Image (cartoon, rainbow, N blue to C red):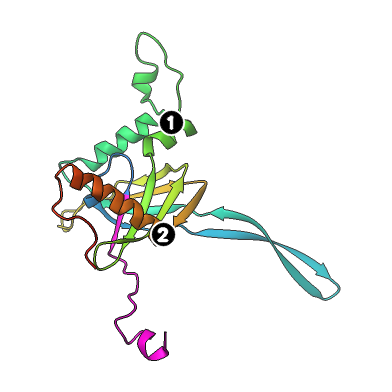
Amino acid sequence: MSEETSGHWTNATEPKRKYRFTLDLNGLPRWVITGVDRPSFKVSETTHVFYNHKFHYPGKVEWQQLKFTCVDPINPDATALLMKMVNASGYIFPNKQFGGTQDEYMSMNKVDSVDAVGGVAITSYDGSGLPIEQWKLHNAWIVDANMGSLKYDDDAMLDINITLRYDWATITPDFIVQAAFWASRIGEVADGALGFDGPQR
C-alpha cells in the first residue's frame, strides 16, 4: 500500500478512542462504569558495576494495580453490590462473626476474593461497534474501594473509585475478539433476538 493511500490523512486508518470501551466484571452493569485504566506493568532491573561503568539487566515483570470508576445509582445500588463482593470474599462483620450463638472463623482469602470479582475483561471497539481489543485480568480481586464524598455545594453524580490487584493480564487480538463477538451474535440471531445475519462493513 502506497504512502499516499495509507497515511493518517486518509480514511484508511482509525485511532483507538478512549470512550469506546466496556468493562465486565461480576455484579456491576456495564453502564455504571465511567472510566478504567488499561493494564500496565513494570520491569525490575539489576545493575552491575564494573570499574567506572554501569550495566543494567532486566529482572521480573510486576503488573501494576488497576483502577476504575463507576457512578453509584440508586438502582442498581453500586455500593451495595460492592459490599456483597467484599462479603463474598470472606469478610464477616464483627457482630456477625463473633456475636452469634457460634463463632465464625472464616476470613478473606484469595480463592473467594477472585471468585467474588469474577472474570474481568476490558474491551475496546471501533467506530462500527466491532471489538478491536480485549484485555483480561487473571486472578483479580478488590484491594481498595473509595466510596467518594458528599458535599452540599456539589450536585455532581456520586462516584466510586475501585482498585484491583491481579497476577497478570493478557490481550486478545482483534480477529479473535471479533470471532467470539459474531459467534455470540449468531446465537442471538438463532434465538430471534437480532435482525441481521452478519457484519455489514
> Taken as a whole, is the magenta stretch helix, strand or loop?
loop
Quadrant location of residue 81? Answer: top left
- Residue 129 on image: x %, y %: 25, 62
Screen quadrant of the C terminus: bottom left
Write down the residue under mark 2: 38
* First reached walking from the N terminus: tag 1 or tag 2: 2
Expressed as whole percent of the image width and height from the top left, the position of residue 17 reads 31, 69
Magenta-drawn segment: 1-23
The mark total stands at 2
Mark 1 Cα-neighbour bin, 10 Å: few <14, some 14–19, many ≥20: some
- Determine whether the residue tagged by mark 1 lies in a helix, strand or loop: helix
Looking at the picture, tell me which residue is in the foreground, 52 or 136: 136
Q: Is residue 159 visible?
A: no
Using residue 70 as the reference point, say whether residue 98 is left or right of it: right
For label 1, the residue is 112
Residue located 18% across and 58% down the image: 156
